[in-house]
Amino acid sequence: MVLTPEEWVRQHVVHYLHVDKQYPLSLINVEKQIILNGLKKRYDIVVFNSDGSIHILVECKAPHIRITQETFDQIARYNFNLNATHLMVTNGLAHYSCQMLFDEEKYRFLKEIPEFSR
């Protein structure tokens, strides 16, 4: 396996979620295919709740890729099908996370992803 810049970011985010935020590795899933509007797409990282619902959806970019509104729109489109309660976009240098407020049809930016709670 080649360690691409994006893969480097992905591996560091998994480490951060597991070590710093205490999410069990058994709840973290990396690079799986999903179907969006008939198109095959791949998500970078998903953290599941113990009931199988999605808690966090993470989009990783290479460090030289700037995080823009378009980047955030990409993860929001993925989330229409996945219904994650939290979204995170990172290039390893800049990190943005938010909590979905489904009832209000909006999201609220957070300083960081919440820690795992049992």
Image (spheres, rainbow, N blue to C red):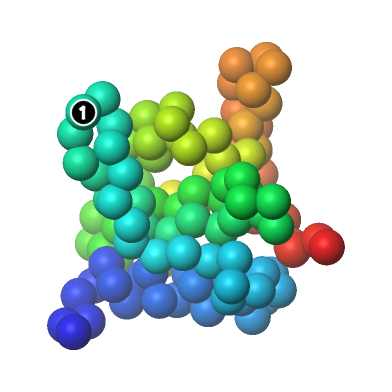
Residue at image coords 61%, 45%: 53
117 vs 66: above or below: below
- Seen at 33% across and 57% down, the residue is 32
* 108 up-or-down from 84: above or below: above
- In the rendered image, which residue does mark 1 sit on? 38
Question: Which residue is more in the foreground, 65 or 116?
Answer: 116
Number of labels in the image equals: 1
Residue 4, quarter of the rendered image: bottom left
| Residue 111 seen in this snapshot | no
Residue 21 or residue 83, whichever sits in front: 83
Give percent across and percent down for residue 115.
74, 62
Query: In the rendering, at what x and y percent does residue 6 appear?
Result: 27, 67
**Image quadrant in which the C terminus is located:** bottom right
Pick the residue in front: 60 or 110.
60
The answer to whether 39 is drawn above or below residue 104 in the figure is below
Q: Secondary structure at mark 1?
A: loop
Residue at image coords 64%, 22%: 102
Q: Amino acid at mark 1?
A: Gly
Nearest to the observer: residue 105 or residue 48:
48
